[in-house]
Structure formats: structure tokens, C-alpha cells
Image (cartoon, coloured by chain):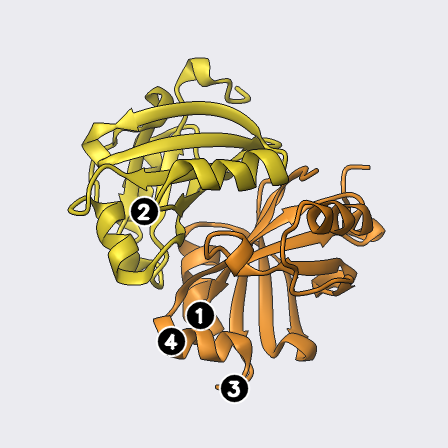
Chain colours: A yellow, B orange
Amino acid sequence: MFSRIDHIGVAVEELEPALELYRDSFQLQLAHREVVEEQGVEAVLLDVGENHVELLAPLGPETPVGKFLARQGPGLHHVAYQVTDIDATLAALSQAGLALIDERPRTGIRGSRVAFVHPRATGGVLTEIVEPAAAAGADH
Amino acid sequence: MFSRIDHIGVAVEELEPALELYRDSFQLQLAHREVVEEQGVEAVLLDVGENHVELLAPLGPETPVGKFLARQGPGLHHVAYQVTDIDATLAALSQAGLALIDERPRTGIRGSRVAFVHPRATGGVLTEIVEPAAAAGADH
């Protein structure tokens, strides 16, 4: 069902100090930077082998990541698993009785198709499913 | 420096309901189960491609994971990056000025060598470095 961990999402107050850590100290390659208005974040992707770290800075305090930061401070925000067919995966998860935040995929970073499973169905772990855009270099 | 995300660690109250989610609903392969007395947990590893999910149930309320659960409930606990030479990595991180919880590696699950970076050096993200045991099937 899941081919790998696509990324971990990390909530940060500001991108620059986080980039100093992940790009400079951890020596991860910066892969992409994008304002995702729909999700209220500016996001940066860095490569870790075939996986990624996604840094998420809120566009304002009333965004989901802004509220997350106000509630519990910076830190691990979500985990995303990569799939090759998000429609089939969502159907399977729904059939397994899991509550979904997104019944249908929406557009994520780099033209991917994404959906979130509800944390109450996953022991408090905000869980994202990602089908990369074909051009993004998935291994198929 | 890091070859991939080795695993995400997930704090759970009990292993069985978490296994129903990760093994049965998410269809991840159960790879390993171990009581790690030194860390006060019973841990289960499940495969996600070359990555893993590590479920962590505390052996008691006074353990680090027990205190984590009391403080913020179940959810994402840490992220671990895989390296081929943990001694060289710790030296490099220390040289970069990062505070380490473990100046020297200790023994982790499945005979791996592990060390934790202090969350105050990593924007609140508890970060583990893992050098797998040779027999554990690292790609070298």
C-alpha cells in the first residue's frame, strides 16, 4: 500500500533558522520551495535519500500550522507515506473504517496529489498520503 | 551525511491497537519486536519500503515515553536518520555546534548504534541518528 515514507513535516516559526539546521548542519539538499496558499504555509523540501524533510512555516496565526505552533510549539507536525495510486489507497483506507480528512485527493506541493487521514483514526499521528506528480521522479 | 529516514518513532499507550492500524489497515510488514529495557519501551518495527515505523509503548509511567504520553498524549515522538558511520556523524554534528544528548553511540533496537541530538538544537524535533548493525541489511 505504502512504498516509502515520503516525508516528515516539521512545523517551524521561521524558515531561515530551520534551513541553517537542515541544509547547513545536516547537509541536506534543498529540493523545492513553494508557498501553498491553500494550506496556509510556505514549505521547503529537502532530500534525504529518497525521502524528504518538509519544513512548514505558517502564513499567519489562523492557519493550521499557525494554530499548531500556538498550541504545542515547533516540532514534528505530520508524516506522509508515498503511494502510486492515491484513489485506490483512499478507497482501501475508507473501507478499513478509517476516518479521512480528505475523502478525495487535493493538490499538494510540487503538483502531487495528497490526502490526510484524521489523527483520531491514527493514534494522534497526523498522516498524509502522497501520490507524486509523474514528473516529480517517482520510481515508476 | 544522512542516507535516508531510518524510521519515525510513534508513542502509543498500547501496542495491540497500534498494530491493528499499522499492520492490518496500513498493511505494513511487521519486522521486529523487542523490549529495550535501557530505554524503557517495548518497540515494534514495521517496514515501509526501506524505511520503518517504530511503535513505542512505555514499560512504565516514569520512562521517557511514559512521560511524553502524560505530557502530550500519543503521537509522533521522534525521527531517526540513517548513517553509515555514526562516530563521524556525531563528530561533525558536534563540530557544527549542535547539542547532543548522547556524545557517544549506545545500543539501539536490533543491535544498531544510536544517538540522540537534543531537541533544543533541532527546533523541538527529537532527532535520532542510527547506524544499523551490519547484519540488519544496510545497503553497503
**B85 is higher (above) or lower (below) than A113:** below
Please state which amino acid type lies under the numbered disc 2.
Leu
- x, y (%) of residue B94? 71, 51
Viewer-proximal residue among A99 and A106 = A106
Viewport quadrant of the N terminus of chain B: top right
Q: Is residue A110 left or right of residue A120?
A: right
Q: Residue at x 29, y 57 (%)?
A: A119
- C-alpha gap between disc 4 and disc 2: 30 Å
Say which residue label 3 marks: B62
Query: In whole angstroms, how far apart are the C-alphas of marks 3 and 4?
Result: 12 Å
Quick one: label 3, few (<14), some, or many (20+) residues within 10 Å? Answer: few
Q: Measuring from the top left, give residue B72's x and y in whole percent.
A: 36, 71
Chain ID for label 2? A
| In the rendered image, residues at marks 1 and 2 fall on the same chain | no
Cα–Cα gap, marks 1 and 3: 15 Å
Q: Nearer the viewer, mark 4 or mark 1?
A: 4
Residue type, numbered disc 3: Glu
In this view of the protein, can residue A1 be seen by the observer? Answer: no
The residue beneath circle 4 is B71
